[in-house]
Each structure stands twice: as structure tokens, then as C-alpha cells.
Amino acid sequence: MMQRKQLIGNLSLLLILALVVILFALLSPNFRTLNNLRSILSSYSHIAIMAIGVAFPILLGEIDLSIGAIMGLVGMVMFNTLLIHHLPGPLAIVIGLGIGILCGLVNAFLIVKLKLQPFIATLATLVGYRGITYGISGRQLFPETTVQAITDPIYTAIDGKIGIVPYAFIYLILLVALTTLLLSRTKWGINIYAVGGNETAARLSGINVDRIRMFAYAFSGFCSALAALVLTARMRSTQESLGLSFELSAIAAAIIGGVSLRGGIGNTIGPAIGAFLTGTLYTGLTMIGVTTYAQPVVVGVVLVVAVAYDKLLATRRSRARTRTVQRIETDATKGLQHG
């Protein structure tokens, strides 16, 4: 039943995206070009990848604010390893993904072992990871590298394309498929929903809650690192500010995509669609001449509507549970009376 409702939600969101595309295609001839389609797929795939990653902590009823800073840190590590230390591309890729996972595990350690609130812990690591990025910046330590481009053929191949479809979008589709299977077909997925729905009940049922939370933050870090690889391969370089405020876009995409802030509800298809919905809005509004100052307002309205809808659904679910409990108690009372 839950999967059916989530499927309906995804289809509804996809329909909204299609209507938005049709609207802007009618309003702007430039919007309906293949170049614009390629640009949207290329420009927002990394946000969608980050949205999928951050969906896992949100599914647990928690949050990860450090994903943008992790992206910046991994991007700078790639810059240093490839342009300063001249490591081979495959090794650099492994290091980058490893750094992302390590950052996620540091977040998890602070939350799981030191019992810090996820908001506070990941806000602190956001600042910390960004500070490390500036501290190790090869652009600052070796100013001559600022005009150099990453040329490793294997690393830059990350940014390839098939026709008009960029590799980044293909990575996204594969990630959506794998995480959908994980959440819907494996014990890990069932446990993630169980912990997000009711952590106390999950712990009492024998689920290793701490391990689930560690996995969620490690996976969030992995996705941020993957997004960093995609973006730095496209730019052939990086900046200390890479990923700045991207956490807001990714979290917004996850929420718009139907991942409940209260945990236990959502999937990874919705956040991917949500990322492209916000990206299409930004692109379309730009093409029809809406000032850049007004564009975040429109996206903000969409986010408020999504959060309000989530709250409405949560209220309905709470009332339904209350009615169910009352009915069970009534039936039990009647049974005792008849007994």
C-alpha cells in the first residue's frame, strides 16, 4: 500500500514536471531546443545525485547539512591529487569517493556516538569541511595551478555524453535504480523505513539502529563525492566555494520529491524528479525574462507547498493511527466483556 502511494506521488510529480516543461516551451522558443534539454540534464544531475544521498538521513527523520561542504572538499582533493601530485585518474576517483564516505562517517560518529543533534552536528561539519577545503587549497598554495585544467583522460571521461544525454544523467539513473532496489527489495531498506517510522520500536525489534544511521550518513557523503567528481570533471577544475548552498537545493529537491521530514516515508525517485523540477523552473523563468531575484521566491513557494502537503499527510496518518488504536481497544474491551 505504501509503495503504491509513493508510486502515485512520483507519477503526480512527473506530471507536474511535464506541465511545467510544456508551459515554458510555449512561452519561450529557446526553451524547447535540444541544447536547452542537454543543458538541464547536465546542470542538475549533480543536484539530483546529492538529493538522493541526503534523502537517506531524511528518511530516518534526520538531516545532513554538510553535503555541499563535502562536495567542495572532495573537489579540492581531486584538484590537488591530479594537478599537484599527478596521481592517475582511477586512483584519484577512489580517493575522492573514499573522502566522501569518510566525511559521512564522521557525521555519523558525532550523531550516533556523541549523541549530538543531526542539525547541530552537520552544521558544525559544514563549517569544518569548508575550512579544510580552504586550508588545503592547491589554488592558494600553488597559485600557478589556477590557470591549469585537469587533463587526465580517464577522469575527464566522467563528463562524456551519449548523443544529447550526458553521462551524469546516466549515473543518476543507475543510482536511482540501485537505491530503489535497496529500499524496496532488501532487508536494509525495510530497516531504514522502520527506523524512520519509529526508532524505539525498531530498536526493540532487534534492528541495529546505529548501523543503519551510520550507513545513511556514509551514503550521503558518497553521493556528495560522486556529484563532486561529475562537476569537477565538467569544469576541469574547482573552486574553494564549490558546492556552496548546494545542500539547500538538494534538501529542497528531496522534500519536493515526497521524502517526509518526519522520516519513514519517501523514495529516491521523487528527489531526482524534484531536482529537475526546480532546475526547470530556474531555467524557464530565466528564459522568459523573470529577474534572478524573483526566481528563488517561486521555488520557495513550491517548497512551502510541498512541506505543507507533507504536514497535511502526516496529520491524516496520525488521525488514522489514532482511530485504528481506538478501534482495537474497543474490540478488546468488548471481547473481555463477552468473555
Image (spheres, rainbow, N blue to C red):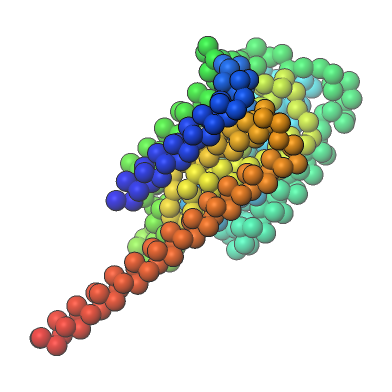
Q: Residue at x 63, y 62 (%)?
A: 116
Examine the rendered structure and indicate whether residue 128 appears above or below residue 321: above
> Whole-percent x and y of residue 283?
64, 30
Pick the residue in front: 208 or 60: 60
Q: Residue at x 87, y 31 (%)?
A: 140
Q: Would residue 189 be found to the left or right of residue 231 on screen?
A: left
Pick the residue in front: 309 or 147: 309
Whether residue 204 can be seen here: no
Whether residue 111 can be seen here: yes
> Whole-percent x and y of residue 54?
56, 45
Could you say which quadrant of the image residue 152 lies in? Answer: top right
Q: Would residue 326 be found to the left or right of residue 64 on screen?
A: left
Q: Residue at x 75, y 27 (%)?
A: 238
> Whole-percent x and y of residue 4?
32, 46
| Labels in figure, total | 0
Q: Would residue 277 be found to the left or right of residue 89 on screen?
A: left
> Whole-percent x and y of residue 268?
46, 40
Examine the rendered structure and indicate whether residue 7 appears above or below residue 111: above
Residue at the front extreme, as displayed: 27
Could you say which quadrant of the image residue 286 lies in? Answer: top right
Q: Residue at x 77, y 20 (%)?
A: 83
Pick the residue in front: 91 or 233: 233
For the C terminus, the quadrant is: bottom left
Residue at the bottom extreme, as displayed: 337
